[in-house]
Image (cartoon, rainbow, N blue to C red):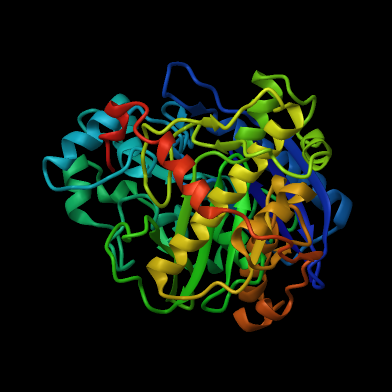
Amino acid sequence: MSVLVIDVGTSGVRAAVVRPDATVEHVHHRPVLPTSPAPGFVEFDAMAIADTALEVAHQALAASGPVQGVGIANQRASTVVWDRATGRPVGPGIGWQDLRTVGMCLALRGQGIRLAPNSTATKAAALLDMADPDRSGDLCVGTIDTWLAWALSGGQAHVTDATNAAVTGLMRADGSGWDLDILAALRIPADCLPAIVDSSGVVAEAIALPGAPPLAGMAGDQQASLIGQGCTRPGLAKVTFGTGGMLDLCLGGQRPGFEARGDAGTFPIVAWRRGGQLTWGIEAVMLSAGSAVEWLRDDLGLIASAAESDGLAASCADTGDVWFVPALLGLGTPVWDFGARGTLLGLSRGSGRAEVVRAVLEGVAHRGTDLVEAAEADSGMGIASLRVDGGMSANVTFVQTLADAAQRPVELSPVLEATTLGAAYLAGMALGLWVDEEEVAELWRPRRVVEPGRVTDRDRWFEARDRSMATVPELSALDF
């Protein structure tokens, strides 16, 4: 038995086949990049995503042979609205990074409704306002998982799983269904929305694929990565270091006690839903991680490739007391300051390329440690070791500095992107390929464990982070 996984990220679509021993084979990837037609706007071509997903899926199946099921992992909160009869989008898709609805979010605050511009809620309202201002059409609203399920099922399934529903801003806090009061405030008809289904469970036949295998697993990318790294027991946590960084911690069956954001800046998430039962978690977010390395490469020209940062940083023993705060887009957990800006401190005549590059890697590592400490504070749980995936997990120097800053072992994912494994586990549990979450936890085998080597100066880090804050006071005043 094998599972096909389709994984839609922010910049591309990947399909792969996962075998019963959790090996990932026949990976096919195609870039599908978003566009930015105006400052703060992020859009994508939903038809291009669907067509590309089918293309890479067919290629993976042609190489692997038949599979027993299909899983989906996806960028969360990105929003599509389409005509139910034709199956065609009525406008551009709006990406999760899009900020066009900031004004709408601020106006809603005056009504006592707290929504963030990066969630689905106001994006859906904006798309409906453009395409159907009087709400007379027969339209479907969905996130990327919903859109893919529709395409794979030939329009038979209009569904979203609980992990994706919970970050739309439209679901009730207890995870029991859509919030009718918020729908009314945004003028989103309830019948436009998908049915909320289990993350692990058969929901439709993927008739667009050879053999029409069952669509049996769906999850947002961060929850899929959590499951893919075997964090299915309470107290286990992972961080994905991609363009940004996100830590997710499994809590178990009990929802966190805070409504929207904990005192340390983390958010409640649905980690997955299986057999109708919710497993909860919390999430901590850093807005810049790999993007800071891209800044070194693309804007400063200090390195020719992201991979070069590893060796160059390793060529010096330390930064010479140079500190970098990766707040290029503001700070997330724990302080949530959108007006913070990237800050480089401690430069001297002896500071060179190597010291600056190392300072950037160490700054991202300290931000990762901020996420760990925040998750521990908001959950009351200790995180004994940290599981890590994403592009930056291939950077040896960075991983060591993360272990040093966090003062705990770092366990590296056996695959660079664990989202594929997580979606496969969810589908596979529904099909009997894996028994349950406990077996998934037992499957975890890190490719390497990195132990702390030295103690870093966290107090100096906090001083540097404080100096990055409120650089743009008008943005610092915003709080979603």
Location of residue 313 in the rendering, given as x and y in whole percent from the top left corner: 77, 39
Q: Is residue 378 visible?
A: yes
Q: Which of 141 and 306 lies nearest the eye of the viewer?
A: 306
Q: Is residue 240 left or right of residue 302?
A: left
Q: Is residue 81 visible?
A: no
The answer to which image quadrant residue 127 occupies is top left
Residue found 74% across the figure and 62% down from its top:
453
- Residue found at the very far left of the displayed protein: 111
Q: Quadrant of residue 475?
A: top left
Position in image of residue 280 (x %, y %): 43, 71
Closer to the camera, 463 or 327? 463
* Residue in the image at 77% along x and 57% along y: 415
Position above or below: 233 against 41: below
Looking at the image, the residue that sits furthest to the front is 349
Lateral position of residue 161 relative to residue 200, left or right: left
Q: Quadrant of the N terminus?
A: bottom right
- Residue at position x 69%, y 39% in the image: 319
Q: Quadrant of the C terminus?
A: top left
Between 154 and 362, the one lying in front of the other is 362
Callout count: 0
Residue at the far top in the pictured view:
38
From the viewer's perspective, tell me whether residue 441 is left or right of residue 469: right
Residue occupying image coordinates x 67% and y 50%: 6
Q: What percent of the width, then of the height, locates residue 436?
A: 62, 81
Seen from the viewer's position, the closer of residues 396 and 175 is: 396
Relative image position of residue 234 (x, y in whole percent): 51, 78
In the rendered image, the vertical position of residue 258 relative to residue 234, given as above or below:
above
Looking at the image, residue 347 lies above or below residue 420: above
